[in-house]
Amino acid sequence: MARQLRTRTAAPSRRARVTIPDRWNLADLVEDPVKRLDSHLAELESAIAQIEAARPELSPSMSDDRLMALLKLSEAVARGSARLGAFAYLWFSEDTKNPEARSFKTRVEERLTALNNRLLFFELWWQSVDEANAERLMGTAGDLRYHLETIRRFKPHTLTEPEEKIINVKNVTGRSAVHTLYDVITNGFTFTLRVGGTKRTMNREGLMAYVRHQRPSIRQAAYRELYRVFSAQRDVLGEIYKTLVNDWKSEQLGLRHFSSPIASRNLGNDIPDRAVDVLLAVCAKNAGIFQRYFTLKAKICKIATMSRYHLYAPHRTEAKKYRYADAVKMVLEAYRGFSPHLAGLAEQVFTDRHIDAPTRPGKLGGAYCYSVVPGLTPYVMLNYTGEARDIATMAHELGHAVHGMMAKDHSIFTFHSTLPLAETASVFGERILSDALMSQERNTSVRQGLLLSQLDDIYATVLRQAYFVRFEKLAHQMIAEGATGDQLAQAYIGELRQQFGRAVTVPDEFRWEWLTIPHIYASPFYCYAYSFGNLLVLALYRMYKDQGADFVPKYLDLLATGGSQAPRDILARVGVDMTSEPFWQSGFDQIEEMVGQLEATLS
């Protein structure tokens, strides 16, 4: 999962020694943030006061030099806020049960919201400027032009200054607090599983390693335990979800007058509604490719009846556990085979001790990369358990990191890509790793295992994510009509069974899977970014295979663009039309070719 990105330039030499830290070092973010919080906030307040003092000067006829001076002050506020906010979130991530970290996170969010609320007037003024003067002022804005265009893009959905301030303040104790409650509850869950005659207690990350266990009975038991624990809290988790959905509806549709719940996300991503509609439609149309794949996988893995319990059943070559140091070496070598420069940047995340890898009780589940400000090495959180999938996750999150590092020369307002493009480098990193492993392997059985692993991952990040969004669209409509949690569960399992057809049976307890998906709580409709990014990368990777080394500088240039241009313009440079059904279909054509390669291993 991408949260954000960033870093320094110099790439370590190939022989540089890599440190493998157990925990990240947060000292690079803010000097003594807990004790000096008031001092750091005072510095931000000083910059904000200077911008406030210039309020009487704001006019469509003002000079472009004066506008740029105010934007530079605004950048300083954004950088300081980003560092404090990042420290608060990363500290909370280390142990969501730590009351000091939770308290500090809440305090920082409240204080930063109050400070940044004081700058709302600037964005509202900028939206009010007439087109001719706006174009004049943006003419010399350089890297900040797209940032200024983005502010104006939201003009039809922006409220008055007092209303915007109220929403920002209430979100801290409302939407943000409710989501934090979900994190605290679910990351505190413990699970019990009997393995080899021994009863084991573990967190979710530990439990999910068993859904890829060699023994079918253990895979089934792991899923049943997951849903036993989550469904026991279905009333409170269901109410949390309905509260978040109703809050989204009230603000995005009721106050901001978006045409649909997903339209707000699309505008934020600067992706046309039509592009998302086409993407989701093409995904549903191609569900049969994965149904064919899972039928084939059942035959290879000797599964009599393919069930949702066994979707991630490992190939016999996958039982191996990997030491963390070996995983780091594999990922860096794969990156180096594509681009020594990218490998050096990825290595820097380790040498700067900006990675937290081990799983432990209370730690936030999943994985993410958090870039904070341009020029600061991004932070990567993993929950490494030694599974082969964890190596792919490492390659994925380091992809986010190098994307931010490549875009280091942009403003804090323009170095982050919008969500769909933010997945490009991460997924490309996974493809680099998979391709490197495949190219080194001649054993048919091992190649078969690698193909299974790749197709499992592509399923999980393309079709599965698209169906999450299909469910969200349905759930937002149902909740607006007063649906209960049980009705949502029935709708969810209906979508699952449509997705898998006759190829995969779906046991009834999977109706509670939606309770376990953090993204639909934290960021409605976020997940199509994964489908978008993965299908885009399949097309880009085909270009790389066709063009070889000539493709690499084009790709690095794409990463270096960051979020300084509209996604449609960035993609047009590599010949992509995101509203084209044939383009998205070409991604599935690549997947179908891989299924064909897998079939060939049986002949």
Image (spheres, helix red, strand yellow):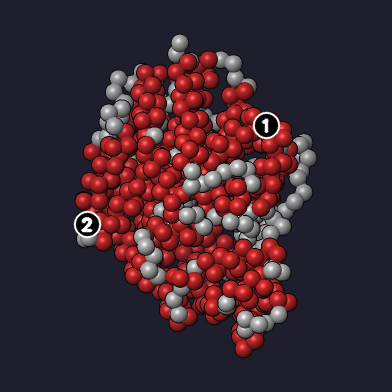
Disc 2 designates what residue?
Answer: 483
259 versus 36 height, above or below: above
- Helix, strand or loop status at disc 1: helix
Amino acid tagged 2: Ala
Across and down, in percent, residue 65 comes to 73, 77
Residue pushed farthest top?
A: 603
- Label 2 packing within 10 angstroms: few (<14), some (14-19), many (20+): some
335 versus 569 height, above or below: above
Of pointers 2 and 1, the one earlier in the residue sequence:
2
Position of 464 with respect to 382 (left or right) is: left
- Helix, strand or loop status at disc 2: loop
User: Dividing the picture into quarters, in which one does residue 175 lie?
Assistant: bottom left
Nearer-the-camera pick, 374 or 321? 374
- Which quarter of the image is occupied by the C terminus? top left
Q: Residue at x 60, y 65 (%)?
A: 147
Disc 1 designates what residue?
Answer: 547
Q: Which residue is drawn at 29% across and 60% down?
A: 242
